[in-house]
Image: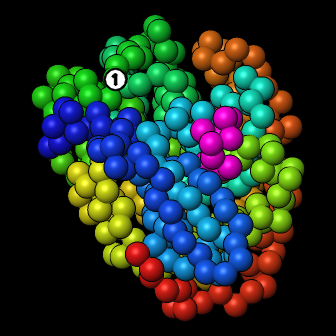
Amino acid sequence: MLSRRRFGQLSAGLVGSAALAMPAIVRAQGSTDTVKMGWFNTTTVSAQIAHVLKRTDIAARNGLKMEMIQLNASPAVNEAIVSNAADVGTLSDFAAVTTMAVGAPVTTIASQARFRSAVLATKKSGITDLAGLKGKQVFGTFGITAFQNAQEAVIGAGLKPGSDMTFVNVGPAELADAVGAQRIDAFFTYDPFVSFFENSGHAQVVSQNLTPVIVLTANNRFVKDRPEVVERYLRASSEALFFASQNHDLVNGWFRSLEPAKNIPEPVLQKASSYDPAWNAKAVTDIKAALSDEQIAKMGTLAKWGVEAKLLPRMPDVSKFINTEIAGKVDTALAAANFDPKSVKVIG
């Protein structure tokens, strides 16, 4: 079992040392365009993509020099993008919706990775399905995608939050303590922590949602002034994802080489990553950068929920903050290209 401190570091995406807070720069050969990318090292598949961009020649082949700025989860990435310290960054879908609700000068430009959220019951509880949550308290961190997913799940099972069962807000470290000691009956979280608690034998999934997505959000200036660079960047990201899908052991090792992800067991990381269909892509055409209509609609649902839960100041028009045109071009071009992941060179 992870210690309370370590679990808190992982779930918050905290950087384990000062050195990790500094940008890690991949030098490209020849004339290149620099792209500053904010990311954090605890999101499955998304973080593996970042490592590929750092450690291979894929960026350079697309005429890019990546400044990979490792930060401490979505709020820090948000701040970096808004302040123009980063051109683009990885955000959870609800974090991206938050930027929309406050009218930040950013645009969501692509889908990068999918992840799993879940409602789990501890082993001691004896609960095996959502109906078993009646009369129970369900613990987790409010204000994240997994919270909305959990509410949706219990309502779908015919339970009314606040009367039939109760959600209780608790921080990640406290949650880890409670699950490890089996002091609670049920909770909600997201991968890789869902897979971690399954793997450790402390809990079992009673409901899961595979729709949450990590998106790429960019500063408006980057999108407006350098759309051709944005296009090459999205192509490099898609190629990096396909390379990762063909080299699990290699990129999982990179993922686990940095704090705080060193504490995620490899089987847990592999299982969690596998809930993204692209992780097991058979062809480059299986990689899609453009957000689908369903994903955009889901972000709209998150926005409505955020307002109702008083987590957002206003209801944003989600469609106005999303650009699918550039990513759509990338998907078309990549499908027609002959990208061979075996030709990629590891450079670091």
Relative vertical location of residue 4 with respect to residue 208 in this rendering, above or below: above
Using the rendered view, name the quadrant where residue 212 is placed: top right
Q: Left or right of 280: which side holds 288?
A: right
Task: Indicate left or right for 173 with 233 as reference.
Answer: left
As for residue 83 lying within the magenta part, the answer is yes
Colour convention of the picture: rainbow
Vertical relation: 144 (above or below) 235: above
Q: Where in the figure is residue 74, as x and y percent of width and height?
A: 53, 37
> In the image shown, does 11 or 181 lie closer to the viewer?
11
Q: What crowding class fits label 1: few (fewer than 14 Cα within 10 Å), some (14-19), or many (20 or more)?
A: some
In this rendering, the answer to whether 268 lies above or below 321 is below
Q: Position of residue 266 (x, y in %)?
A: 26, 63
Quadrant hosting residue 101: top right
Quadrant housing the N terminus: top left
**The residue tagged with tag 1: helix, strand or loop?**
loop
Start-end of magenta stretch? 80-89
Q: Say which of 175 and 261 sits in front.
A: 261
**Which amino acid type is shown beneath numbered disc 1?**
Gly
Q: Residue at x 86, y 37 (%)?
A: 320
Residue at screen point 32% across, 29% down? 172
Residue at image position (25%, 55%) is 262
Residue for badge 1: 171
* x, y percent for residue 220: 80, 43
Q: Is residue 169 visible?
A: yes
276 and 173: which one is in front?
173
| Residue 269 position within the rendered picture, expressed as x and y whole percent measured from the top left | 33, 59
316 sits left or right of 128 in the view: right
